[in-house]
Structures are given as C-alpha cells and as structure tokens.
Amino acid sequence: MTFDETATLGRRDRKKRQTRAALATAALRLVAERGLDQVTVEEISEAADVSARTFFNYFPTKDDALVGNGEGDRDGVLRALAAVPAEAPALEALRRAFVEFVDEAQGDAELWLLRMRVVAQHPVLLARLVAGNTTTERALVEVIAARSGLPSDDPYPALVVAVAGAALRTAMIRWTASGGGGSLAALLDEAFAAIAAGLPDPRTLPDPRTLPDPRTLPDPRTG
C-alpha cells in the first residue's frame, strides 16, 4: 500500500468516526430534549446533516445510536488486553485494557455524560446496555482464562472479570455524578487499588492514597 493510499484510508476512517459521533450526538440531544418516543431516525439524520440511509449505514436502530458503539468498544478493550504482557496479573491486565476506553470517554466527556443521563432516564436503553456488557464480559472471561492457563469454566476468570467490570462501572458512575470534572482514569485506578487492598473497612484507611498499587496483585498462575 502506498503512502497516498494509506492517507486516503486514514481520512475515510476519520470521516466515518466523525459521522458516527455526529449521529450519536444528535440522537442523544434530541431524546434528552423530547423523550425517546418523540424522536425519529429521520429527525436524527437531519440534525446530523446526513440522510436516513446514511444513518442505517452506521446504526441498525435509533436505540443503537443512543447506547453507543458497544461492539467497537468491546473490540478496543480486547485489543488492548491482547497487548498487555502475559506476565501481568489478570486484574492488572484488565485495568490496563480499560485505560484506553476511559481515556476516550474523558476526551469526549460531553457526549458520554449525555449518554449516561439519557440511558438512566430510559430503562429500555439500560437493558440494551447491560446486554452488551454481558457479551463483553463473556469475551473477556475467555481471554483471561487463556492468559491464566485455566479452563473457561473455572470460577477465577469469571470472578476477576466481574470484579474488574464493577470497578469500571463504579468509576464511571462517580465520574458522571461529578459532571465529568475530575479524572476518570484516576477514579478507575482508585477503584482497582481498593480491590487490590481487599476492600478493607474505609474507617481503617483514612487516606485512600495509602491503598496499594493494583499492579502488585498476585498472579493466580503462581499462587
């Protein structure tokens, strides 16, 4: 592939990301203003200055535009996890895999905060989001099992993925509650540090900075 061909592909990819983001933003803003049932695909497309046909090139339904690119987020986390050295403990590997995701969310805070608010207002969207998260968790369990040298039905991979997912959700909820003003990455690290410490009674840890580094977690393969 030539340099010009690579540059063209890069521009096309950026254009696609911009169009997807514009459609998602338009959908979220309209639903936040009017309600879920009062917004059509045609209105979303018009607000994003594209055709309804273009909308369906990016999202199968209106609800998919609202809950975000779950498949893309999942693929990104899996790619990041694959890049973590094999010797890293499972929980630390998951923390690193989530970093790119939270950095992207922080970089597009307005969109993410709006999405969290709209999803919270409409239970049907929350159900779709949970279903997507379940699919992601199953994929992560398979990877963690392989990394740990354990069968996929061993309880450890499922448990560590569930705990890591809870840490991510807790960080996202706290970040949303603060209006996105703080560091999402710092909140994620704080949640993982608490897990690494064994979730001690907070009354015994007046300073959260005394919690251990999550990267010091034991590796189950070595006991």
Image: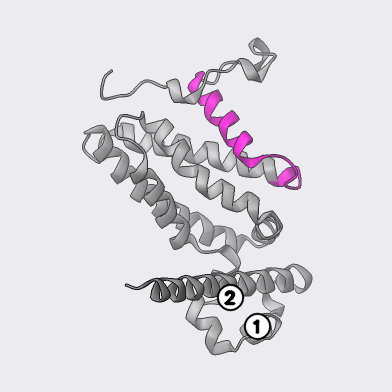
Q: Can residue 185 be seen in this snapshot?
A: yes
The image's mark for residue 23 is: none
Q: Between residue 41 and residue 189, name the one nearer to us.
A: 189
| 128 sits left or right of 179 in the view | left
For the stretch drawn in magenta, what is the main secondary structure?
A: helix
Q: Secondary structure at mark 1?
A: loop
For the point 57% across and 43% down, the residue is 169
> Residue 98's x, y, as percent?
49, 43
Splitting the image into 4 quarters, where does residue 216 fall? top left
Q: Residues within 10 Å of mark 2 (few under 14, many from 20)?
A: some
Task: Name the residue carrying label 1.
Answer: 40
Mark 1 is on which residue type?
Thr
Task: Name the residue carrying label 2.
Answer: 19
| 212 sits left or right of 47 in the view | left
> Residue 99's x, y, as percent?
51, 42
Q: Residues within 10 Å of mark 1 (few under 14, many from 20)?
A: some
For the point 62% across and 75% down, the residue is 23
Splitting the image into 4 quarters, where does residue 52 fall? bottom right
> Vertically, is 125 above or below 50?
above
Tell me how far mark 2 sits from mark 1, CA to CA.
18 Å
The span shown in magenta is 176-197
Q: Between residue 193 and residue 141, name the one nearer to us.
A: 193
Which residue, as the protein is rendered here, is positioned at the far top?
204
